[in-house]
Image: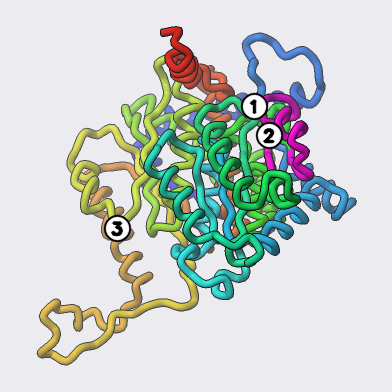
Amino acid sequence: MSSPIRYEFNEARGAISDAHWNELIKPLEEARQEVFADVELFNSGGDIPEEKQPLDAGFIEFPRRLLDEYEKDSSGSLLGRIMESGQMLRDELDRLLVLGIGGSYMGMRALFEGLCDPYHNEQPRELRGDIPRLYFEGNNVDNDATQSLLGLLKTQCKDATDFAQRWGIVVISKSGGTLETALAFRLFRESLEEYYGSDSREATRYVVPVTGETGKLRDFSNERGYPTAFPIPDGIGGRFSIFTAVGLLPAATMGIDIVQLLEGAAEMTERFQSASSGNNPVMDYTAVCHLLEKYSGLKTRILSTWGKALEASGLWYDQLLAESLGKQEKGAFPLTVVNTRDLHSRGQQHQEGVRDKLITNVFIDKPNDDVLAIPQFEENRNQDQLNKFAGKTMPEVLRAAFDGTNKAYADVNRPTADLSFPELSANTLGQFFQMMMLATVLEGRLIGINPYGQPGVEAYKNNMNAILSGEM
């Protein structure tokens, strides 16, 4: 097993009584058993009881299943074909558009921001590791942003025979009926077909749909004759789909080690299933969050990321928690912050505001090898008074801010916990994503809420479509 991420919760545990902690042991274990019983029920193919519908438990075993298939048949397996398609897109394109909304793009955005250079798109291809530039659209109905990206492609991509001006699309939608993505796909597909020629080989080769086995996008893909398309399996909902082709195909295109990503996820599942409390991040995180919400009123869960690379991972988690548990007038409120940036905006409220917040710090232990240090200046140029810190590295400054902030919260009895990454890698991100998905499902079963499905989201979609159709 690779270096595991660690969940350290002594500070938060101090705000929980022993009686409440001990009372939770049995129901938490029963909820864990229910999570894996759901997997067996899902795999059985039998009738799903009404109270369990929908049952989208397929994500739990999916990483290990993909890895096992790949080990048996590397080229013929689904994972092998995803890697082959990603290699083709990487080798033949210099720009890739990912069209999707919600779970259809937020996981890949998290991977991109976590594992690629922050200024990836600004660099020449040789400094990008021969990896395409990446753009996200279809995640909003924003005329100006869409128009701007269309304009960028039209002004910078004028010669389709020039490799540096070749671009393509990965469009992600399980049903194909989500208006934001469908509208963006129509607009960018029109532009792509105009660029390459609607009957050209490139017009179909450079569009790769990721969609359900049935639905509007699948029907269109079949009719249009796209040579490559990947499935979103039944039983895996959008916000749980990062380890399907939804996340894996664009990740493979971006040169991310998707085998290590899946290994990290599979390792976390095995740890959740077998490890005891105290060494089980899924169980421990769920227990701390649940008890502090129930008995201390900490209904706001702040994922406090230290450094910018994990902000998008926090936003991915915001959707996961909000859509999964925000039902029946229940569910904690998720909020992602980035420090030290947001210590200068939200920090005052966290320190002295309403006592309704549990702060989980996410910290990367090992920085990049190339670190910056505070330089020594001549005394007549030391107006900023930083010479006293000369030689301290930026990671050391960040760590001091982290420790100082935690102490400030502890001094006024503000509960915190720490989720530590030994390093930021595909494997540790795989562990993180699976941990948070499992913890969300576990908490749902613990409090009697079905964590799958998002019926509330359908209300705005139905109203929007009715208004556009003149029915409202």
Judging from the image, the colouring scheme is: rainbow
Q: Crowdedness of circle 3 by 10 Å Cα count: few (<14), some, many (20+)?
A: some
Check contact, mark 2 vs mark 1: CB within 8 A. Answer: yes
Residue 376 location in percent, x, y?
24, 87
Q: Quadrant of the N terminus?
A: bottom right
**Relative to 218, is 207 above or below?**
below
SS of the residue at dot 3? loop
| Mark 2, residue position | 211
Residue 350 location, quadrant: top left
Q: Compute the Cα span from label 2 to label 1.
A: 7 Å
151 shown above or below 396:
above
Which of labels 1 and 3 is toward the front?
Answer: 1
Q: What stretch is highlighted in magenta?
A: 208-230
Q: Does the magenta stretch include residue 227?
A: yes
Is 356 positioned to the left or the right of 91 in the image?
left
Residue matched to label 3: 340
Residue nearest the observer in this picture, 53 or 34 = 53
Find out whether the residues at labels 1 and 3 contact each other: C-beta distance under 8 Å. Answer: no
* Residue 101 is a magenta residue: no
Identify residue type, mark 3: Thr
In the picture of the structure, the residue carrying the numbered disc 1 is 175
Q: Cα distance, mark 3 to mark 2?
A: 39 Å
The answer to whether any part of residue 20 appears in the image is yes
